[in-house]
């Protein structure tokens, strides 16, 4: 029973870690990255649809992304969604077939602002991991009458190790992203 609680907790914490890494990848660096544009929601026939489902995204050069819609009728909607996307500031133009989104050079102040955003996302992920830990600890405490205090104490010690490993994983991903953001 304790093993089941710990296995479930580890899986949930791993998902929280992956979600944090995914959030970090959506914060822009100095390079055009198709990942930045994947989750932009485009109003496609009245339905908000992720851009990754409506078009193929390719790097043309370091700061320019080439977006080729699968449906040419969505060209204007895609262009507008990219213009309205927060934290991108992309210059967008189309030639009737493809859209070219050029990301401006990042200033030092803008880089520091992105670092603050990433730190906030990291703290949110740590809070999520801690909430998962708290719930698992409550589940372990509920098992005390069935398995005994020693087994629960051992389970709690293992829970702390799992939690520490996932929080360290979030910190490592944060350090990598900060380095990436601050490099010129």
Image (spheres, rainbow, N blue to C red):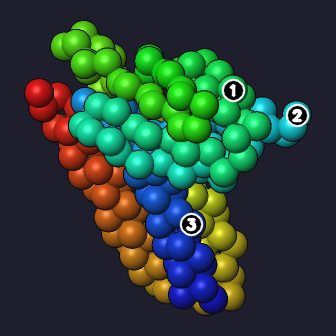
Measured Cα–Cα span from mark 3 to mark 1: 40 Å
Please tell me in which quadrant of the rendered image residue 75 appears.
Answer: top right
Gap in angstroms between the C-alphas marked 1 and 2 = 13 Å
- Cβ atoms at labels 3 and 1 below 8 Å apart: no
The residue beneath circle 1 is 76
Mark 3 or mark 1: whose residue is earlier in sequence: 3
- Res. 163 visible in picture: yes
**Residue displayed at 12% across by 31% down:** 183
Quadrant housing the C terminus: top left
Please state the total of marks drawn on the protein image: 3
Badge 1 element: helix
Name the foreground residue: 21 vs 5: 21
The image shows residue 89 at horizontal and vertical percentages of 44, 17
Please tell me which residue is depicted at 26% across the width and 39% down the height of the picture: 61
Reading the chain from its start, which is encountered first: label 1 or label 2?
2
Callout 2: few (<14), some (14-19), or many (20+) C-alpha neighbours within 10 Å? Answer: few
Task: Give the residue number, with chain letter if any, for mark 2.
Answer: 46
Residue behind mark 3 = 12
The residue at the point 22 percent across, 13 percent down is 107
Q: Residue at x 87, y 37 (%)?
A: 45
Mark nearest the camera among 3 and 2 is 2
Dot 3: what SS? helix
Compute the Cα span from label 3 to label 2.
34 Å
Earlier in the chain: of badge 3 and badge 2, it is: 3
Q: Quadrant of residue 2?
A: bottom right
- Given residues 126 and 178, the one toward you in this image is 178
């Amino acid at each position: 029973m304790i093993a089941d609680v710990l296995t479930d907790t580890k899986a949930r914490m791993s998902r929280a870690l992956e979600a944090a890494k995914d959030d970090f990848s959506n914060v822009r660096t100095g390079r055009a990255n198709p990942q930045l544009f994947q989750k932009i929601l485009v109003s496609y026939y009245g339905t908000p649809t992720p851009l990754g489902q409506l078009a193929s995204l390719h790097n043309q050069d370091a700061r320019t992304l080439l977006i080729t819609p699968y449906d040419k009728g969505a060209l204007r909607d895609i262009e507008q969604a990219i213009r309205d996307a927060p934290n991108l500031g992309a210059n967008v133009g189309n030639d009737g077939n493809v859209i070219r989104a050029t990301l401006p050079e990042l200033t030092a102040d803008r880089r520091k602002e992105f670092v603050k955003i990433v730190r906030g996302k990291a703290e949110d992920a740590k809070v999520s991991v801690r909430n998962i830990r708290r719930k698992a600890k409550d589940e372990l405490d509920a098992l005390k009458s069935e398995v005994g205090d020693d087994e629960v104490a051992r389970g709690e010690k293992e829970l702390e190790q799992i939690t520490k490993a996932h929080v360290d994983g979030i910190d490592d991903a944060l350090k990598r992203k900060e380095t990436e953001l601050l490099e010129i």
